[in-house]
Image: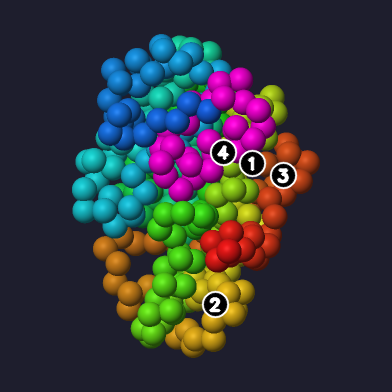
Amino acid sequence: MRFLVTGALGQLGRVACEAVAARGWQAIATDVPEVPVDDFDALAAVFGREQPTHVLHCGAITNVDGCEADPDTANRVNGTGTAHVARLAEQHGAALVYVSTDFVFDGKGTRPYRPEDPPGPISAYGVSKLLGERAVLERGCAAFYVTRTAWVFGPGGKNFPRAILDRARSGQPLRVVDDQIGCPSMTRDLAEAMLDLITSGAPGGIYHMANEGSCSWHRFACQILQAAAIDVPVGTMSSAELGRPAPRPAYSVLDCSKLTAVRGKPLPHYEDALRRYLQEELS
């Protein structure tokens, strides 16, 4: 099997390529500037040359505040770019996983969001990713999957655990928001779940994909420092106090039971994922 991976230099795309290779399949890594997903001709040339059987579409603009400042670019890359990928995957008969986000929800829920719950993004980033979802689903292909995940972290690159560790080691005071609740999700576990789903023969559609368990950002920060044996106090603050340009969902816990049924097992708990991440990062 031949897997075309977009966003292969990113946090998730990189480990997705590793996971593909570990299963004995071929990973075809693509990323900007060589193959920007909003460049249809460049994408078409890669599809024509490589003839992928499967596509893992991890490429996206994920800078939430950057998207708020430039929604047109966000829509072009995350929306139109995804439409290009879906069109070409259909033309070449390739199965497709598109990585979406909990930001498609407004965060006003009080129970874990199910795949069939109506979206209502409150940020430009969420709007752009929802455009991508619709571009995939409107193709109506049996092996096209939209996977929504959340609070992604993993080895290499910028992520929340690394930022917390760096700040704690620098001696700077730590204050973290405690009014956002979600599901921390590790890239290595997400990559395995993506591969299980795209090769499962399960019906296409929307699947939620996150590590088990949920917490606030503040609790997650405390757990990171405790697991790393760093004794630094962590104060609390509200999202309003933080004052980021883009609004975030206050509650975006995902119900992943549909994916669990397909795989026959859930993703590991996020606390287990955090331990494995720190073992890799701190070794």
In the image, what residue type sits under mark 2?
Leu
Report the magenta residues as a range. 1-26
In the image, what residue type sits under mark 4?
Glu
Q: Earlier in the sequence, mark 2 or mark 1?
A: 1
Kindly identify which residue carries mark 4: 18
- Name the front one of labels 1 and 4: 4
Nearer to the camera, 273 or 91: 273
Residue 118 is one of the magenta-drawn residues:
no
Q: Position of residue 270 (x, y in %)?
A: 63, 61
Kindly identify which residue carries mark 3: 260
Mark 2 neighbour class, 10 Å CA radius: few under 14, some 14 to 19, many 20 or more = some
Mark 3 neighbour class, 10 Å CA radius: few under 14, some 14 to 19, many 20 or more = some
Kindly identify which residue carries mark 2: 225
What is the number of the mark on residue 192? 1
Looking at the rendered structure, the secondary structure element under dot 3 is helix
Contact (Cβ within 8 Å) of mark 3 with mark 4: no
- Name the front one of labels 2 and 3: 2
Q: Earlier in the sequence, mark 3 or mark 1?
A: 1
Q: Earlier in the sequence, mark 3 or mark 4?
A: 4
Residue 61 lies in what quarter of the image?
top left
Q: Residue furthest front?
A: 283
- Name the front one of labels 3 and 1: 1
Q: Residue at x 68, y 50 (%)?
A: 267
Distance (Cα) linking label 3 and label 1: 12 Å
In the image, what residue type sits under mark 3?
Thr
